[in-house]
Amino acid sequence: MGIALASEERLASLGTGEPALATLCSHSSLQIFHGARAEGFRTIGISVGAPHRFYEAFPKARPDEFLQVPAAREIVGLAERLRREGAIIVPHGSFVEYVGPEAFQALEVPVFGNRAVIGWESDREKERQWLEGAGVRMPRRFETAGEVDGPVIVKYYGAKGGKGFYLAKNREALATFRPSGPHVIQEYVLGTRYYVHFFYSPLHRDGYRVGEGSLELLGMDRRDEANIDELYKLGAQEELLKAGIRPTFVVTGNVPVVLRESLLPQIFEIGARIVERSIELFGGMVGPFCVEGIMTEELEFKVFEISTRIVAGTNLFVNGSPYSDLTEPGLSMGRRIAREVRAARRAGRLAEILS
Ligand code: AMP
């Protein structure tokens, strides 16, 4: 047996019946419901206000039942109902942001994955401690503007959707920057971005072994980010600034990518080290996580962020990806999650994948 993340008390609501998989109606909910249904689970959509009509357009991804809340934060008020339904919550990339970290931690409903990860992911300082402790290369961080020796990206704490970033080509350009709040100055890494979709199973004993379990690579994407992605068409930064146009990184969509095959060993090693360190720090990450970084021309991957839940880039691969097809044709991340619940339930090991 591996590390138990959930107490017996937390799992009591699951009883012996078939659980239902529930998530907030947003982000990657279509894929989560689609995957859960494909594995034979009942599905519950938690909707803020009336459910969006677009679910009617996707019969294979429509949840069996909708529960409504006036605001995402009020999901706590649904806890009793969700327990009665034997629900397991599958949190996605927007879940914690909308519900709030405190409400999420306090939610008395079994959750897929280890909720202790929140404390390490939502704080950029602790995230760096985790990743650097894992021996993962990250963009350099400058304590003062005087140390800057190249292009930098300035990130305000809690900047959402990439807004609140500032780019400077060099130290001189940074000198004109007047910060309006707490921020970090980071090396602006030149290269190409990759968002790598991993799944860590503490149960699976085959494949690429890490810890007691195994690491799977299910896909990769690159994010379309407005307005930075098209900004080059307007010419040089200084000219743009004069015109009052500042770059932003607001995600508007995703495109599929694959990596040079010779770079896969590096990517797997990074994923494995992040998982190993998470086991030492807080009992381990379970399920989907995304390593987000930039491959430089020296072919060194520098990680600027990690997301520890299913990311929206996986929505590209509802019917499998060039990677997941090599494990099992047609396997989506949503379906992989449902499959892990099924396997754990059969083996009597739900405490190791739920919290
Ligand atoms: P983040 O909020 O850290 O996920 O960053 C949002 C976006 O900013 C990323 O998707 C990248 O496009 C860009 N970005 C973040 N950090 C860096 C960096 N150190 N160098 C270059 N681009 C970055």
Image (spheres, helix red, strand yellow):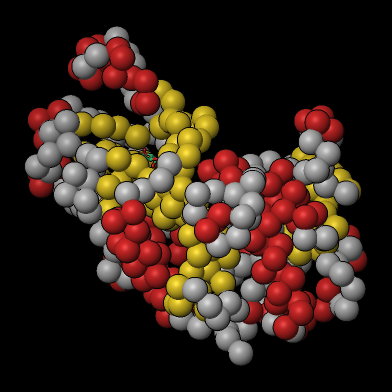
Q: Quadrant of residue 229?
A: top left
Taking 56 as reference, is 119 left or right? left
At horizontal 25% and vertical 59% (from top left) the residue drawn is: 137
Taking 326 as reference, is 87 left or right? right
Relative to residue 222, is residue 108 depicted above or below? Answer: below
> Is the N terminus in the top left, top right, bottom left or bottom right quadrant?
bottom right
**Of the pair 179 and 305, the residue shown nearer to us:** 305
Q: Is residue 304 visible?
A: no
**Of the pair 94 and 212, the residue shown nearer to us:** 212
Q: Is residue 256 visible?
A: yes
Q: Where's residue 120, x and y in %? A: 45, 64
Taking 100 as reference, is 206 left or right? left
At horizontal 33% and vertical 19% (from top left) the residue drawn is: 231
The image quadrant in which ligand 1 is located: top left
> Is the C terminus in the top left, top right, bottom left or bottom right quadrant?
bottom right
Query: Which residue is farthest top?
Result: 243
Relative to residue 44, is residue 153 depicted above or below? Answer: above
At horizontal 32% and vertical 49% (from top left) the residue drawn is: 260
At horizontal 90% and vertical 73% (from top left) the residue drawn is: 17
Q: Where's residue 184, x and y in %? A: 29, 46
Q: Quadrant of residue 125?
A: bottom left
